[in-house]
Structure formats: structure tokens, C-alpha cells
Amino acid sequence: MAERTTPSFLRTEPSPVLPPPVFAGGAVKWVRENMLAGPGSALFTLVGLAFIVWATPGLVRHLILDAVWTSPDGVACRAPGAGACWSFIARKLEFFLYASYPRDMVWRVNLCLAMGAVLAVWLLWPGAARKGLGAALFFIVYPVAALVLLHGSEALGLPKAPTDLWGGIFLSMIVATVGIVFSLPGGVLLALGRRSRLPVVRFFATLFIEFVRGVPFITVLFMANTMLPLFVPASWSPDRLVRPLVGVSLFASAYMAEVVRAGLQAIPRGQTEGAMALGLSYWKMMRLIILPQALTVVIPGIVGIFIGLFKDTTLVAVVGIPDFLRTVETARLDPAWAGPTISTTGYLFAGAFYWVFCFGMSRYSLMMERRLAAGRKR
Amino acid sequence: MAAIAQEPAQESAHEAAAIEMIGVNKWYGQFHVLRDINLVVGQGERIVICGPSGSGKSTLIRCVNRLEEHQSGRIIVRGVELTNDLRKIDEIRRDVGMVFQNFNLFPHLSILENCTLAPIWVRKMPRREAEDLAMHYLARVKIPEQAHKYPGQLSGGQQQRVAIARALCMNPRIMLFDEPTSALDPEMVKEVLDTMVALARDGMTMLCVTHEMNFAKQVADRVIFMDRGEIVEANAPEPFFANPQHERTKLFLSQILG
């Protein structure tokens, strides 16, 4: 029998490299694939279109065509058929921003808000220069400067503006910023504590997290308001604004801790071992190896807590802090502006304010996720 | 059978010993994973540890830098006994490099940052100096051109060579290898083994858990066979492979050498 010496197949020339088939099909194809893919999809598209056609004219009329844009008082807004009363917002904007803060001192608030905005953009802008300096200014210099500016200091010739006069949007921003700035490090420490090898640390971290998570936010606020003064000497009794700030920070920290813990658990054990084998101490290992990875994994959860926290700042009103929503509430009850559209206009404005900030945070976090993913190319 | 595996090559065990393990025992719950381990590793000695899976060989070398705690007996590394004293543990870890089966590179750092991290943060070396050192070792494992990539962009063999370079950047006196080629595709095993052979030729004290028997024949001063948590046989590679004494060693060798 003849021995087979040639293989059953042997390539003699390379097969040609072909371009991929064309997938793009323009707008028509997009519509067909996304809106008319089948009878159900087509029906849904039609219902959606019908809703838009039905709702749009009314909305446009109410919000733009019939809206009252300039009016010194509520008379025009009370006219039959009048739409949204934007002049109410314009006339009350100062009150929304500063509440009862003395009007001749509001430049101090504006300066604070502007400094905060500049520093926030500096820190959040991807690839901005000298972030270390920016962080030092934001976390150390800015709080002191803001406190001196807002509260006043006789030594610097700034008259006092006690915190019971504070309110409005700037107060909401203070509550949200303090909550955000304290909840992340607080949450990280609690999460590390809950995973600690030391039983006492683990016990207290777990106790705190489960306790705070187990009671409603309003309860935490009431407790902070009434119980915090009991823990310190009477002369030290914390300011009425500090108490809800502490409450917000503690509450958000407990939720943050669980999100961070999820991130820590997602990091393979090998990372810890690799770091330990190099001789890194626990804190260096956490700071340089574990936390950067763990926090990246849970960015959506962290931002979710920030968004929730931002909206929950409206609850500080229950302990008598006149936040932005409370100023809207007060303004809409002003008899001079009584009218059928005042409440809806006020709430629409409040809703838009919160939505813009929350949506901004959401988009920013998506962008950061994409940037981090691209940088690492896993 | 004498539990002490063998005297090291040097004349005075205690002066020159890199690692001394005396009557070491360890349990995972009820499971006795290390049973009366006695092993002295001399300065510059290269030891290959083999044995079936679950025989405790990884646990043994992980005890040397305290990734695992032993429960009785003594482990002395370069004259320092491993106890609960964290400072002593860190001191030993600085001098003992380790290479893992799954590389354990830090995925969020570039290759260069992986290598400079420990010199900068543990040895307090200036950044520039650490980078020069890292490039030196990356060149030695033959991948300096990958320095600015991330671990996820490298092949398994390249990642493992980075892991070796990262350990070498700490200028260790002892290197531990925990099955360094077991997670690699076959065509990448050689590049890692070549790096390890070069390291062995330079006189590094090495403890390697591996099933690469050709590597053992090439560089090992001693081959240790472990089974069921105990050292069964230890010998120089030639007699170990040519003339295994214990039944379990013979069975194991017949299984892996075919």
C-alpha cells in the first residue's frame, strides 16, 4: 500500500483579506430597526407619537405662549387662561437663592458659590492641572473661608449673619456638599471597619451601619437635632444648622459603606496578596491598590447615593432649616401672588432645579466610567 | 525516617541559612495541611517543591512570607522569626519576593507603576531612581517596550515576567514562586522558565513550587516531594529522578513523567 506522504490539505497561497460587509444603513434603517421592528414595536411607536402630538401643543401654550413673563405682581397671573407664571419665579429668585440672608450681604454668598463652583470644576475636570492644590483648597481652605464669609467675622469687619437667617438654594448646596464630602470617606472607613480582622472594630462598624440604615432619614434628622446637644456641654451646643449636617453625613455614610463594601468584595483576593507580598502596609495597600479599584467598580452606586442625598436635602426642612424647597413653599403662599398657576410654576421650577443637578451628576459619572474603562483597556 | 530533609550545602546551617522551618504544623479547621515540616534552605540554594495537588506545597511557601499563618513550630527567615509582630512581617516581606500563579499584577496601574510602587512606597526610593530600577529589571525580563502599557494588554507570559520584574525591584534576597507557569498557555511557559533560569544562575535563593521537571533538573540544588502535608523525599535532582526511594514519589513521578 502506498504511504501517504502529502497532508490531506496544504495551503499554497494566503486566502484574501476582505473588507467587512456594510452594516450602516442610514436613518431609514435605524427607524426600521428601532421603531418598526414588528407589529408590537410599530404599535408602541404609533401610541408614543400620538401621545406627543396630543401633549405638545398644551405644554407649549402653558409654558411659553400663554405664560406670564413680566408682571410686578400676581394680577396678570390670575387672569383667566393665563399659563405658567414665570414672573413669580423672577420676582422671588432672590428669596429662593438666599431666603432671609441680609440682602446687603448677599455678595458674600455669591462669592462663596462662585469659589465653590470654580473649585468643583477644577477638581472634576478630567486632566486638569495641579489637582492636589485644587483638593487642598477645596477641602481645607474653602470650608474655612466659606464659614468666615457666610457667618461673618467682626475681626475682619464682616457683620455677623446668624445661621437662622440662612436658607434657600445656597443652604441646599451647603447641605448637599457637606453630605457628599463627608459620606465618601466616612463610608470607606465604615466599610473597611466592617471587613476588619479586629472584632471590636467590626462590631461597632456593623452596629452603626445597620442602625442608621434601619431607621428613616427623618428620624436620623430628629435624633441629630435633639440628641446631639445632649452629648456635649451646654455651652458647646452645636449650631442648629450643624446638627442636620451631622445627621445627613452620618446617614449617607452608612449607605455609602455598603456600596463601598460591595466594591471591596469585587476585588480578587490575589490583589491583596500581591500587595502584601511586596511589603505594603495595610493602609498603603488599601489606598494604592484596593480602594482605587473597588471605588471604580462601584461608581454607579456611589453616584446613586450622591443623587439620593442631593434630593434628600429637602428633608432638612422638617427640623426647621429653610432649604430651597421650603422657600418655594413659602413663596407660593404669598397672598400677593395667589393664583391658580403659582404652585405648579413654583414646583416646576424646583423640579427642574433638582433634575438639572441630578442629571448632571449622572452624566458626569457615565463619562468618568468610560474614561476609566478606556484608560485601562481591560 | 528523618524529618530533617537534608543539610544545606553550606558548612554552618545557622549562619548561612536563608530560611529555617522547624517542626511547622498548620491546620485549616480540622484538616492538617502541614505536618511537622523541617526544612533548612541555605543562602543561594535553589529548591523545587513538587507533589500532587492538595499536598500543602503552596501553603508551605506562603508561610515563608506569612500570607498563611503557621500554628506551631518556628519559621526563621534571614535570622528573623515570624511571629505576630507586624513590623517583623513587613521586614521579611520586603526581602522576600513572591511570584503567583495568577500574576496578581495591579490592573489599574501601568507596567512601570506596578514595578515602581513598592520601591517608592515601601523603600522610600525617589521616583526617578525607582523608574530607572524598574526599567533595568524590565529589560532583564526582556519587555522594556511594554513599560507604559497596562497589564490587561499583555499576554500571560509577559504578565508573569512583569510580575518577576516587580518582585526583583524590591531587591529581594529570597524569591518564592507559586506555580508560576501553571496558568500559562503552553507556548508561553518557556519564556517564563528562561527568566527563572537566568535568575537562578545569578545566585538568587529560590523556592519554586512547580511541575516543570526539566526546570528542576536544570537549576535545582534539591527537589522536595510533598504529599498529604508532609515532606516525603528530598534529594539532589539526579538521584531524585533517576532513583526515587519512596513509593509515593515513584508513583507521582510515573504519573507526571508519563
Image (cartoon, helix red, strand yellow):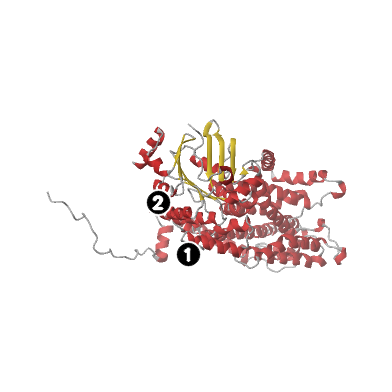
Residue drawn at the location 68% of the way across and 68% of the way down = A69
Q: Nearer the viewer, residue B119 or A135?
A: B119
Horizontally, residue B209 falls left or right of residue A164, namely left
Query: Of residues A163 and B7, which is closer to you in this image?
Result: B7
Question: Which of the two labelled residues, at mark 1 and mark 2, occupies the earlier sequence position?
Answer: 1
Chain for numbered disc 1? B
Which chain is indicated by disc 2?
B
User: Circle 2 — which element?
Assistant: loop
Label 1: how many residues lie within 10 Å, few (<14), some (14-19) or many (20+)?
A: few
Residue at x 81%, y 52% (from the top left corner):
A239
| Image vertical order of residue A110 relative to residue A224, above or below | below
Q: Residue at x 52, y 32 (%)?
A: B31
Q: Mark 2 sits on what residue?
A: B185
Counting other residues with Cα less than 10 Å from the Cα at mark 2, is it few (<14), some (14-19), or many (20 or more)? Answer: few
Q: Amino acid at mark 2?
A: Asp
Question: Mark 1 sits on what residue?
Answer: B145
Cα distance in 3D space between marks 1 and 2 = 22 Å
- Answer yes or no: is residue A317 visible: no
